[in-house]
Amino acid sequence: MPLKHSSLCLLSLTLSLSLLGCPSQRVPPADASKLSPLAERQNTGYELHGQRVEDPYLWLEDATSEAVQEWTQARNEDFRRYTDSLTQRERLYQRFQQLWRYDDEGTPEPCLLSERIIYRTKRADQDKWVVHMRESSEGDSRVILDPNSWEETESLASFTPSPDCRYAAFGKARAGDENPVISVLDLDTLEVLPDSLQGWRQGAVDWLHDNSGFYYSSKPLAGEVPEGEHHYWHRGWFHRLGTAAEQDLLVAHDDEVKETWNSVSVSEDGRWLIIQRSLFNKTELWLQQVGSDERRALVTGMEDQYSATVLNDKVYISTDWQAPNYRVLRTDTAQLGREYWTEFIAEREDRLASFQGIGGRFYARYLHKAATRIEILNEAGQSQGSVPLPTIGTASTWGYWSQPEVWLAFSSFTHPRAIYRFAAETGELQLYKASPIDIDPSDLVVSQHSYPSADGTEVSIFVMHHKDAPRDGSVPFLLTGYGGFNVSITPRFSTVKAVWVQNGGGIAIPNLRGGGEYGRAWHEAGMREHKQNVFDDFIAAAEWLEREGWTHRDRLAIAGGSNGGLLVSAAVTQRPELFAAVLCQVPLADMIRFHKLGLANIWTEEYGSADDPEMFPHIRAYSPYHNTAPADYPAILVTGSENDARTDPAHARKFAAAVRAADQDLGKEQPILLHVQGDSGHRGAVTIDQNADHYSRNYAFLMEQIGLQAQQPALSASEAAGQQGEITTSD
């Protein structure tokens, strides 16, 4: 059955928003009855803090095992066979191809110490951006790097020119593995130099201004550290141009704590090095003058979060020290002691999300009700007004302190990403490049609301739907969320979400605790022993959507990835009757063993560790894999990626096996499927074809379960030039 409970007839909306009615009018549902056998349930487990922890699918952690590979292949075949039969899949695939293939040109990137300009282009028939360079704004252009000439799954992970654009360090990754290998390109001759670097996962390049070399970071190779620890011991190095890796100098490292990240950056004027050691939301900083061996501490102790910028021999320090919503402090490069720090920007009611010096002014980006507000300040810290934004949305700025141009990118749920120039002298925002995506979002409406969570905490939520959608519970909705790692979920345009709404669905996005929308306290209220608050917030959002008439649980799908995959897997194991379909992507699901897989021990700052006897009962209480009690589960699609450098696909395999075995019909009435994607990483695949295939199958699966049919409306942005949807705010 495509719907878990009694069906609801749908109301007709508009010509461009056509929903099918009762299930009797629908195409025959895909057959989920012929799935592969259940995974073998073994008598495996372990003792922890005097308690027995059952782990019957522990064997599925070993991706090198032939049995695991065969089991995974069979589940992938189940997934493809089922999704091949969905009428929505092909329509979505064609729509995504239409929306994601277009001719585009990026913004110019002027070189700091020369007239050269770097920019990028991508044609509709290309998957990867091509890098170009001009000798000046009026000069001829030439291609300096074309990743489309590489193997199909190879991608350009980074491209960092020297300040005068004489050289560039570029990183080549493969199949989404987030393991770039950095090479050096001579931008005069276009010759790739023989230079090599230390370690793996090479990145964070920052050049010295004399082109003598650059700083970078990497992790040690297997065999250089104790077994299994090559995912840790992140280090900063200096590479002198024209030398081999063996001659690189180790300049930033931690010999005691393997989970810290260590890096070096160069100030814009080329005179100062900022050495950073971080452990998620805690930071230590040192300052060193280029050419000097003296390294002076700016802040140590790993107690709060700090970042620093050096401009005109002043150090600007963004921090949450004694300021949960963040503030900016200032001191002189000659006087780094905390007793010399003065407050440059005081803490405000809104969270300070970023702070930049561009064109001789400062731009402080705040989050106001989870949307961007940018305040302008002079060197004395006095407010010079705000940047006028097109509507409620998400904006970012960039540029150099020493150059006048201020660039701004803006996006919102109903406003595809556009690029602007900001004229600071006049306060005018000038459109530089509108989005080339061929879509008309003018029929989409977004509103912001709040609802009470289980403990009475008010949580904000964005709701997006078609302007003619009824509020009678009949609209199929997709509820998504994240709720972790201080990550802020702000209004951004998504073609996937827009297509969902244009086909008759609705989207709901709550700002869950654990995120960064409302400062440090909001984040801490959803981490470690408070993690259940995040799941309560999400479940309360689903109940609110139904209570307020936006949708009905028979029409409600949920989706989340990574930490959001943990979110939806916890939600469905705690309240399986509340949802009709679940898309659980690259999740963490075995929270008792998560820190033993790959690099995940660095996340114990966020989740805690089950090895800690005080955290163990909190984690065991919600760990989705360990809480798949027998129930009538909704349709569930669990996905993983073979080359995921963050969340091991073992989580997806184990959770899919456990939840299907616990389902009262063994995942055959409402399908419970697994797909481990090949040639993909945590962020997806490399090519448009691959991504269109993945997204069309995943979202066709959700649509099938909640009665949403994919249409192909002939929409064109040019037909509605200048029209944009509006966001309203209500309490």
Image (spheres, rainbow, N blue to C red):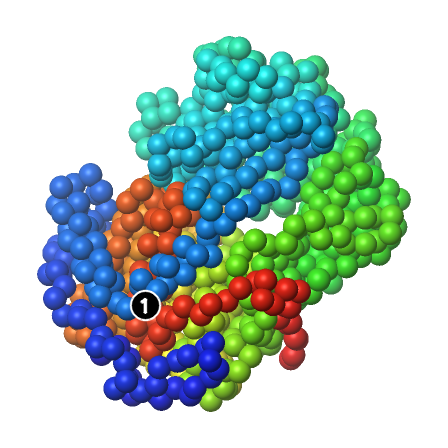
**Residue 141 visible from this viewpoint:** yes
Q: The N terminus appears in which quarter of the rendering?
A: bottom left
**Residue 51 visible from this viewpoint:** no
Disc 1 element: helix
Q: Position of residue 629 (x, y in %)?
A: 25, 70
Give the class, few, some or many, for how many residues have Cα within 10 Å of label 1's Cα (few <14, many ≥20).
many
Q: Position of residue 57 (x, y in %)?
A: 19, 54
Is residue 678 placed above or below 547 in the rendered structure? Answer: above
The residue positioned 39% from the left and 80% from the top of the image is: 19
Judge from the rendering whether residue 268 lies leftward or rightward of residue 37; answer left or right.
Answer: right
Is residue 644 placed above or below 442 in the rendered structure? Answer: above
Residue situated in front as seen by the camera: 385 or 453: 385
Q: Amino acid at mark 1?
A: Gln
The residue positioned 69% from the left and 49% from the top of the image is: 432
Q: Quadrant of residue 54?
A: bottom left
Judge from the rendering whether residue 483 lies leftward or rightward of residue 614; answer left or right.
Answer: right
Give the number of callouts. Answer: 1
Is residue 666 placed above or below 324 in the rendered structure? Answer: below
Q: Label 1: which residue?
A: 88
Q: Position of residue 292 (x, y in %)?
A: 70, 15
Q: The C terminus appears in which quarter of the rendering?
A: bottom right
The residue positioned 61% from the left and 67% from the top of the image is: 720
